[in-house]
Amino acid sequence: NSEYKIYWTLVTEPASGSPYLDFAVESSGPGYLAVGWPLTPGKMVGASAVIGWEGSVKEYHLEAQSVPGVKELTPSALTETSFTTENGLSVMKFRRNLEAADRPPISTAEVETNFIWSIGSGNELAYHTARGGFSVNLASGVGGAVSEDNSAQLAAARTAHGILMFISWGICAPFAVLAARFFKHLGPIWFKVHAGLQATNFVLSSCAFGVAIWMVGGVDFTTPHRGLGFFTYIFAVIQVIVAIPRPHPDPKTPVRIGWEYFHKGLGCTLILLSPITIFYGLVTIGAVLGLIIAYAVWLSALVFFFVFKTVTAQSAKNEDGIPMTSTASAL
């Protein structure tokens, strides 16, 4: 397309007779360039790729759709590598040995070879800002199928997913827990706040989960973030189902006691899983350090408030012999 061009020339090594391909990849973008050869047309996972920026052109195996899943291949099948930037135009060049083992095949016969490509925004491995796929007959230069570049839609969906999940699990869920834990002395209002926040959490996280399914194309466990996110959402669904037939607290029957243990235990599990999942999500997309620090500060503030209220509530209970939550125990 207008942002990305690829050139190639078939070369035969005079001494060994081994076939090589000289590649040049050109883009007007400011960051890294990548070209790869997928096992499945248009799919990143399982492909080998060459990714380069100023000072680095290396070969990688793409084990997952995340930065940790991009593993450098050694020994490399590349020679004569270079990356230059001049007048806003970046050019990556390399020579690829066609007989290298453990790589998806590149054919120079009268058949089409599948490619994937991407552009990044910086000089490091990170989530791409544009990407696509195509097939081409390297012998004739005739192009075949070209997959749609929906990077803009994916970027918007990824942003929406992150914002919705942060509101759900970074704000609504912890505030709902705080309301139930420390503000029962305010009367029935605590329960309305708790239930309202958890309902909002479930609706927003359901929307975010749907966006994730659309982005990935189904349920996917190739990264820790996706696996943890799936189980966190399933646990949230179970929590909602269990909350609907909530037994009345008076009298406190064995069924009510068992329900409380399950409800609180699953709630604690979700509160512990959600920040881990969010951190993995930030790492997966290669988020800037400032965003990761900002979330860490927010999480630390929530933990500090929880500990502070726990300590002060316990002190008040010890001094007066009356727990702060006793006035609303009938709820």
Image: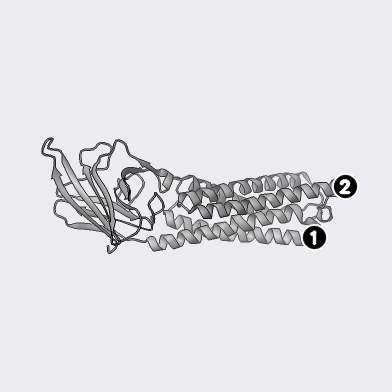
Outermost residue on the right side: it is: 320
Q: Position of residue 283 (x, y in %)?
A: 48, 49
Q: Position of residue 67 (x, y in %)?
A: 42, 47
Quarter of the image with the C terminus in it: bottom right
Q: Is residue 77 above or below residue 211?
A: above
Q: Amino acid at mark 1?
A: Leu
Q: Is residue 308 left or right of residue 171?
A: right
Q: Amino acid at mark 2?
A: Glu
Label drawn at residue 323: none
x 86%, y 45%: residue: 318
Q: Secondary structure at mark 1?
A: helix
Q: Is residue 57 above or below residue 217?
A: above
Q: Is residue 156 left or right of residue 205?
A: left
Q: Using the image as rendered, state which of residue 122 and residue 243 is in the foreground.
A: 122
Please give the residue where the numbered disc 2 appears in the rendered image.
319
Q: Using the image as rendered, state which of residue 185 and residue 310 is in the foreground.
A: 310
Please give the residue where the numbered disc 1 appears in the rendered image.
186
x 67%, y 57%: residue: 175
